[in-house]
Image (cartoon, grey):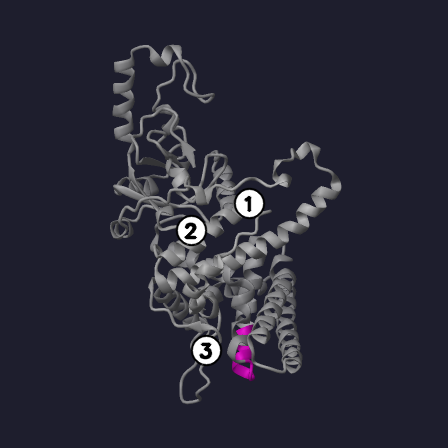
């Protein structure tokens, strides 16, 4: 998020800088077709945290800059607006030289950054969407007023101490307290998700929880919790949550028919389409995803002429098979220790699964050297998980083992392949660090 120090942007306006200095013509044209953009910081608490901004293109900015210089005469010859400007700078040059960022108007009584759940310009980032169809669906919504008394909290003594005067013991105490703070914030956030799904984003119930979650972020030493006089309104939220939060149906969860529930079902169906194996013998099992398998096929072709690659490929396959068998065996042992089907048992099982997935992610994927090697390891894990599910009783949640361990990698492989097949250019899943490498290879520069 970048403030417009030139004041060429009017209140409620914004400018998206994405590759102008580097000549990303396709993205630039796509943005300049849109009249509006949606922006939101994470986490978001209130309906007004999603702001709708009017986009201003380069041509309009040039005209405004020329008019400003004409009206003010030698204003820019005698005064600089920021450390980025020289005394003879055209105010438009600031926008033309930007490579990445959302420039927000500095006019008006309240910044759009502050409207986005209390953001500012000290390095905050925001999700931005300029898709015309989506922008049309979103109505402008007033931002939550966070200057009212219920949002004013006195800082704790620990928060007032300067960092240079904090002792080693105090640092250790802060680290321990931070874990508790994160736990409390997580509980409020999960409760807020459920309240928004059941009652609506702008409902009194959601606003009560959102206020406490908002305060908990910036005030770690204040225990922010729901007052008892609101408990009777939120009893359903405490006991049941929407299925898109990940809990099993009939175990403290219900099937949500709201927007997130529909989107969750759609995305999950797409994932299931490439991993589900039919238990019914009369039905044909779903084929392996061709995009993921193309990674393995390419490595297999190279191995035909390179014994080192052939050996590495064989070792990776054996490593994945042993890991899957080990996970399946450990899971059977863990299930034998669970004696009931209550909520505590479900939570314990979920925590055990998360620890397992983190462990296997570290030892099967992240340990590989380089992006290509990590993608290949993820693809082989995907194939071996599928093979195990076909050849044995490795069914249910276990057939999703590869997706839980390397979902981001597998989805990136599919997304990159689909984008490449359209001929549009750089894939949307390209990581920021990869983008820098590409620019350096082309002899360009990216900030």
Image position of 444 (left or right of 223): left
Question: What x and y, as percent, mark residue 236?
Answer: 43, 69
Q: Compare marks 1 and 3 and give the one earlier in the sequence.
A: 1
| Residue 300 shows in the view | no
Q: Are marks 1 and 2 in contact (CB under 8 Å)?
A: no
Image position of 246 (left or right of 342): left
Q: CA distance from mark 2 to mark 3?
A: 28 Å
Determine which residue is flagged by label 2.
45
Q: Are marks 2 and 3 in contact (CB under 8 Å)?
A: no
Magenta segment includes 405: no
Depth-wise, is mark 1 or mark 2 nearer the camera?
A: 1
- Identify the residue at image location x=61%, y=39%: 159
Q: Residue furthest bottom?
A: 282
Q: Compare marks 2 and 3 and give the one earlier in the sequence.
A: 2
Label 3 SS: loop
Q: CA distance from mark 1 to mark 2?
A: 16 Å
Q: Which residues make up the magenta segment?
A: 385-394
| Image: 169 above or below 61 | below
- Res. 250 mark: 3
Determine which residue is flagged by label 1.
219
Residue 310 falls in image quadrant: bottom right
């Amino acid at each position: 998020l970048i403030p417009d120090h030139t004041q060429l942007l009017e209140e409620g306006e914004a400018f998206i800088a994405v590759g102008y200095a580097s000549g990303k013509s396709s993205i630039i044209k796509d943005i300049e077709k849109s009249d509006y953009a949606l922006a939101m910081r994470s986490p978001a608490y209130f309906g007004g945290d999603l702001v709708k901004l009017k986009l201003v293109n380069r041509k309009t900015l040039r005209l405004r800059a020329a008019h400003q210089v004409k009206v003010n005469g030698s204003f820019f010859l005698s005064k600089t607006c920021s450390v980025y400007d020289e005394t003879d700078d055209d105010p438009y040059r600031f926008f033309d030289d930007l490579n990445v960022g959302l420039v927000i108007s500095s006019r008006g009584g309240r910044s759009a950054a502050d409207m986005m759940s209390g953001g500012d310009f000290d390095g905050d980032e925001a999700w931005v969407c300029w898709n015309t169809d989506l922008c049309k669906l979103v109505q402008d919504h007033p931002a939550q007023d966070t200057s009212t008394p219920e949002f004013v909290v006195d800082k704790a003594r620990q928060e007032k101490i300067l960092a240079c005067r904090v002792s080693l013991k105090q640092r250790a105490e802060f680290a321990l307290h931070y874990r508790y703070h994160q736990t409390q914030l997580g509980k409020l956030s999960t409760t807020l998700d459920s309240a928004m799904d059941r009652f609506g984003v702008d409902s009194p119930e959601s606003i009560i929880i959102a206020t406490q979650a908002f305060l908990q972020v910036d005030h770690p030493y204040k225990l922010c919790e729901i007052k008892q006089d609101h408990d009777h309104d939120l009893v359903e939220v405490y006991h049941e949550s929407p299925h898109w939060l990940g809990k099993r149906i009939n175990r403290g969860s219900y099937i949500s028919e709201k927007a997130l529930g529909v989107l969750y079902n759609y995305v999950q169906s797409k994932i299931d389409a490439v991993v589900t194996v039919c238990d019914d013998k009369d039905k044909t099992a779903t084929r392996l995803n061709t995009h993921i398998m193309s990674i393995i096929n390419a490595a297999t072709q190279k191995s035909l002429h390179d014994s080192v690659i052939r050996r590495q490929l064989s070792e990776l396959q054996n490593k994945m098979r042993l890991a899957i068998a080990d996970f399946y065996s450990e899971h059977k042992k863990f299930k034998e220790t669970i004696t009931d089907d209550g909520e505590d048992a479900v939570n314990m099982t979920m925590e055990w699964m998360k620890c397992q997935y983190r462990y296997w992610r570290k030892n099967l994927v992240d340990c590989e050297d380089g992006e290509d090697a990590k993608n290949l390891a993820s693809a082989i894990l995907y194939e071996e998980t599928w093979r195990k599910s076909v050849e044995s009783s490795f069914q249910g949640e276990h057939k999703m083992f590869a997706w839980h361990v390397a979902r981001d990698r597998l989805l990136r492989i599919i997304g990159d392949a689909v984008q490449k097949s359209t001929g549009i250019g750089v894939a949307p899943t390209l990581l920021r660090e990869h983008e820098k490498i590409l620019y350096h290879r082309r002899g360009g520069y990216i900030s």
